Amino acid sequence: MKFDRRSETSRPVVGFFLDGKPSQGLAGDTLMTAILTQDGYLRRNEFDGGKRAGFCLMGACQDCVVSVEGRGRLPACTTYLEPGMRIVRP
Amino acid sequence: MTVAIVGSGPAGTRAAEVLVRAGLRPVVIDEAPDNGGRIYQRQPPGFQRAGKQLYGFEAGKAAALHACFDDLRERIDYRPRTLVWNIRPDGLNTYGDGRYGEVAFDQVILCTGAMDRVVPLPGWTLPGVTTLGGAQIALKGQGCAIGKRVVFVGSGPLIYLVAWQYARAGVAVTVLDTSGFTAKARQLAGLLRGGGTFMKGLHYIAWLRLHGVRIFEGATPVAIEGGEEVAGISFRDASGRARRLLCDAVGMGWGLKPETQLADLAGVPFDYDAGQQLWLPRRDAAGRSPVAHVFLAGDGARIAGADVAELAGTRAALAVLETLGIPTEASVLARLDAAIARHAAFRRALDNAFPYPAALAAAVPDETILCRCEAITAGELRRAARETAMPPAPEVNRAKAFTRIGMGRCQGRVCGPAGAEILAAALGCTVADVGRLRGQPPVKPVPILAERAVA
């Protein structure tokens, strides 16, 4: 599973780091979009270790929380990507 | 005199409009980075799509609401990206942009909106599964589909709208509608009262059929399949035949449920609504709750859709003005009240045409995860109801204490409705009998911050 960009693909490229690896998203991407367009999960559940990739996309279910260096834990679905962000998948 | 409005969707925007016109400067707080709510979610700066492409038939309404908000913006104290995580009799506790805050208020209008109501299925935690609303937000807010071959499962008006939006975006879609044709046909008279809304629904369905999209009415989902991500979905069709579809994503949802946590913390009493199969905060037709300073409007109080939310936001703000002794026009109030009442008949028919599949929820297999947050299974909840070593859990809050179902990060938002059905079935009582999960602050996770930097 990957998010599939259907439109709005001519936006400027934004560089960031995903688990230490240089990656690229587009300006206006949420962290969720930036991650799921290249790799199919956002976090591992603390209890069963299973891969998770969010669920509600509106900040309610908390199943998309990722760590951003200097910013702490943030919901990937409602946080916008910023240049140079260092995102770590829990 | 401070009036606080929580939420800047259709209800919150219209409430703010009324207060500003009366010369007040309300505080408008929204957790989201932008206004419009989820229904009229605005796309980020730099996106180019036209309103028609984003909102379809509702483009005019979305544009009007956005224009209304933009016009108010300098005349309200607007605080986006701010979570209200607790409410006290005289103030709100907030968190946003890395800081805690407090907002004192004399009156508060809660326009907290809604989220999808779901039924857990085996495999529903796999990457690739989202809510119907989530699938729509991905497309509307980000121009992304949740996959290349998407199956939508559930019922309610949203499933056909989302399927239509995805199909028009060029995504291969299939619809598994768990409500049968007869349940809908039986509500025809009531649905026709919806007029344009009902016709739009028929349009989506007709368009999907015309474009070869497969729709299985009366389907029963069995499991979402896949190892580490979605690979397919198995289900029984209306004739009971076992079927399987290959897909890389699934959108699921059975209508919406209101976000009532703040109303709960404010002390508003709740009643079980058999029509919506939900516990709803008590309020009168104008949106006054029994708690003197608390008003409720929009889908956060009762699911009625965006059109009603706009009316209810206006009405609740007028009720606030009445409370403050600011004159309002009786004819305006009467017109609003009549319009809100007209919509109610259509909503009742919709609730009946697309009921929450209580039997499906009650029958979630024992080994299926019920609580996504902490990976707790339906079987563990059933054991808590039947446990002989300790007194069985007679209602949802005791069951929560025994099993942690509803105690995770989402605070029972996701598992709540299905958990109540499972517990009621295990205890042999009604879902109203097992009660309602009590809210706790913070209503969403907030970090524990150090008071000052440690040298």
Image (spheres, rainbow, N blue to C red):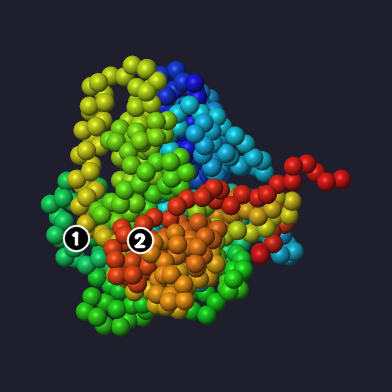
Q: Residue at x 30, y 40 (%)?
A: B308
Q: Is residue B444 left or right of residue B154?
A: right
What is the quadrant of residue B212 in the picture? bottom left
Residue B208's x, y, as percent?
29, 62
Above/below status of A73 relative to A47: above
Picture quadrant where residue B201 is located: bottom left
| Chain letter, disc 1 residue | B
Considering depth in this image, is B445 or B53 the residue closer to the camera? B445
Chain name for mark 2? B
Q: Looking at the image, which residue is at 42% across and 24% down? A: B19
- Which circle marks residue A50 in the picture? none
What residue is disc 1 on?
A: B184
Residue under pointer 2: B434
Closer to the camera, A28 or A86? A86
Q: Nearer the viewer, residue B169 or B188?
A: B188
Say what secondary structure mark 2 lies in: loop
Q: Residue at x 35, y 26 (%)?
A: B318
Disc on the earlier residue, 1 or 2: 1
**Image quadrant in which the C terminus of chain A is located:** bottom right
**What residue is drawn where x is 59% and y is 56%?**
A76
Kind of residue at disc 2 = Val
Rounded to the nearest angstrom, the CA distance separating label 1 from label 2 is 29 Å
- Image coordinates for residue B294, horizontal then vertical, percent: 41, 34
Q: Position of residue B395 (x, y in %)?
A: 39, 62
Q: Nearer the viewer, mark 1 or mark 2?
A: 2
- Residue B69, given in percent of the width and then of the height, sits at 46, 32
- Residue at the far right in the pictured view: B455
Q: Is residue B176 visible?
A: no
Three-letter code for the amino acid on which mark 1 is drawn: Lys
**Crowdedness near tag 1: few (<14), some (14–19) or many (≥20) residues, C-alpha within 10 Å:** some
